[in-house]
Amino acid sequence: MTRPRPRLRPRQRLGSDDGAILVFALIIVTTVALVVGTVLVRGDGSLRATVALREVAGSTYAADGAAQVAINDLRTGHWGGTATEPADWAFDNSDDGTGCFGANSDTDGNPANDAVGTLDLSNFYPASAASGDGPTSARVECVAEDSTGAQGSPVPITNQNKPGNAILTLGTGGETGLTSSASGGNSLRVHGGVWSNSDISVTNGDIVSSTSIRAHTGCAPTSALHAPVVDCSSGTVADPGYPSDPSVTGTGVPPLRTPPTSCPAVVTFEPGYYDDAAALNNLTNRNACRDSVFWFRPGTYYFDFHNGTNDPMYDSDTNGGGGSEWNVSVGALIAGDPVGDSLTNPRFPADGNCRNPIDDVTTQGVQFLFGGESRLRVDGGANVEICGSYHGDRPPIALYGLRTGTSTRTSFTEASGDDGDPLTTSGTPSVTPAGSDNTFTGATAPALRDAGNGSATWFRPNGGATTVSRTVTMNGFAPPATIPRGSVVKDARLLVRHKASQNNAGTASTITLTPAGGTALGPFNLDRPGTLTTQTVDLRTQQPTVFNALQRAVHGNGYTGAKVDFTGTIARNLGAAATVELDAVRLELELYLPQFRAQSDAGLGAGNCLRLGGGCNLIGVGPSGGSYHGVFYVQGTTYTPTTRIQLNLSNLQQAEVFRFGVISRSLDFSTQGNPTFQDAVIQLPDNSPGWGFNGTLVQLKVFVCPDSPTCAPSPGRLALTTRVQLWDPSGSPAPGRRQVSVLSWSHTR
């Protein structure tokens, strides 16, 4: 069977375009796909970029807005804390425990944690409707710059003109270096470091320092100490050894001043040396003077009181007893250059009554130096402000306790090795005219200075019917150098080598001593020796009335010399053998000159109550355990390296401060009542170029948290930093009226 023949497929002709359309279609599809893909990719990137840019813009706007809110809060004095807001408060970098935005109530026992320095702005910047994200939150952290605002200074402050610590106690044993008891759960606040070369004891409240608290031999309890650095086993700090103003100028002890005896509206004191606490207390501790202002003019005041019976310079004829404590309990005491009408209208209880050394480089204030056992107590209702002087090379020390000097007696006696020989006549002696009888002959200065150089002799060759007297007057008796006012004579003796006419009661020779510029002391009788004899007349024991008068004269007027009158007497009807002879007159003096005496002077003996364990304070504010109703300011450094300071401040309402630091052997701080003042009681200014108090500089950091209801506790991303100045023209913060200057504004990338 024949199979069917297969159909042959027709052969394609060469050069035909059949199927080309498919290739074109594939090319077109591929190209379109690539273009569309590229467009889609690029579109997605742009979309993502748009979204990202929108988020960046939102964060930027949120950061800008948050910073503006914070700046406005600083301008208006916004209080963001839980503690009670003080009246008219605005942040000015003070040491009152507040931060930029107020303070919280203390809940953890650490006042250092109470300041509010952050501003949390939850859900602050709204999200756009198209984004679908949540709003942006922000957090602003605010930190004040050192040496600005309340911690600023209109004068340059460096390490050269301020102490190294706000509190430095130098004692190393025998007593607690720093004791603090703040009533009502309050704190001893300190701006600057606290350093005790022994220990620190807190019996109530806390001690809060802006920088550090250190002790050498322990702290009790450490939980009451709050500072960036707390070290209770540190080393010790050496006494800086600051010189007193007289030491720097080389002027020595200033001249003696006698306090006024009455108390008008303004009682004025001159710079100088004051040695009688009783005389000062007759003004500052007398109720009749309660309305007076006691003004101490600018200058140096040296208080070395001799009212303690144990003091070798004590004498009841020049100073009353009762101890060497100056008590200020009434009136207002202003020491330094007064500000405005403060003498007639004191600003107390506020400060600012005298020019503060932190305000003006030309400030000339006072320096109160205390020597010997002298000390100051302020209590009752007295208000006190003491202002020191500004120096560029040393602290403005307002209260100074002397470290060196001892009670040294000056002697002009026959004894060898003393300060000089007895005082003798100089110039030409004069004699009583002869009249109808003879008078003294041979009266020359060389003859009457020393024994054996001749003598002055008088006799009556023809006797006489009456008893007569003749006088030799000798001047001189001057010391090698003028003995200044305030000197205390302890012994005085006249060495008289003479012979009487006869041993009868009516023929005794007499001596009269008259200090230069003073009144006559005497006359008093001498013995009646029949031959030339040296008689020692101890004025203190044998002629106490004359001696006491001499003490008062020398203390009140000083001593430059004296006149001595020797009067001889010859009775009637005696022959030529009845002669009166004077061979020599010499004056011995032993005395204390005004001198700088250390408060640890061994010459004061065991009775010195300022010594360690003696129980007295060089500076005592408020009675121990009692109540003080005034205010006390020291605008300057307090430097009492060998003595103790006690501060018992009652109902502390005002900024009662020791500005420029305290250096003492030990310090006892306490408060009574319910203090409301929360600033630093003892302050050490920050180093400053002298910009003043008016401007408070703060640095703000703004963190943002997109799509988050809060930025706490995590701060989020840092988006902005800015530096802002808050300017108060008056120097005191004025909420709502402060001038604001933005010094820098920088977004982070």
Image: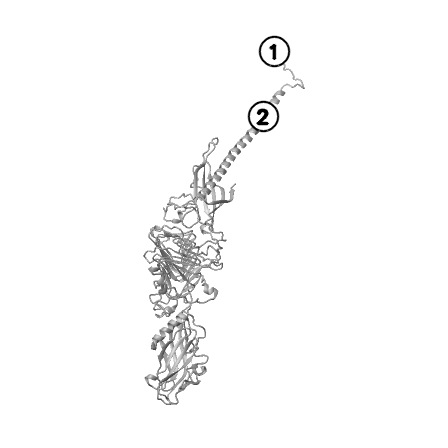
Disc marking residue 296: none
Q: Amino acid at mark 2?
A: Val
Residue 556 picture location, percent across and down: 39, 70
Q: Amino acid at mark 1?
A: Pro
Q: Is residue 366 above or below residue 729?
A: below
- Which of the two discs, 1 and 2, labels the residue nearer the N terminus? 1
Whether residues under marks 1 and 2 lie with C-beta atoms below 8 angstroms apart, the answer is: no
> 195 or 322, which is in the foreground?
322
Identify residue for label 1. 4
Residue 397 picture location, percent across and down: 44, 60
Q: Residues within 10 Å of mark 2 (few under 14, many from 20)?
A: few
Q: Of the residues tagged 1 and 2, which is closer to the observer?
A: 2
Q: Is residue 654 above or below residue 135?
A: below
Residue 109 picture location, percent across and down: 36, 49
> 260 or 271, which is in the foreground?
260
What distance separates the C-alpha of mark 1 from that of mark 2?
51 Å
Residue 439 picture location, percent across and down: 41, 85
Identify residue for label 2. 32
Report helix, strand or loop for mark 1: loop
Whether residue 716 is visible, yes or no, is: no
> 614 or 24, which is in the foreground?
614
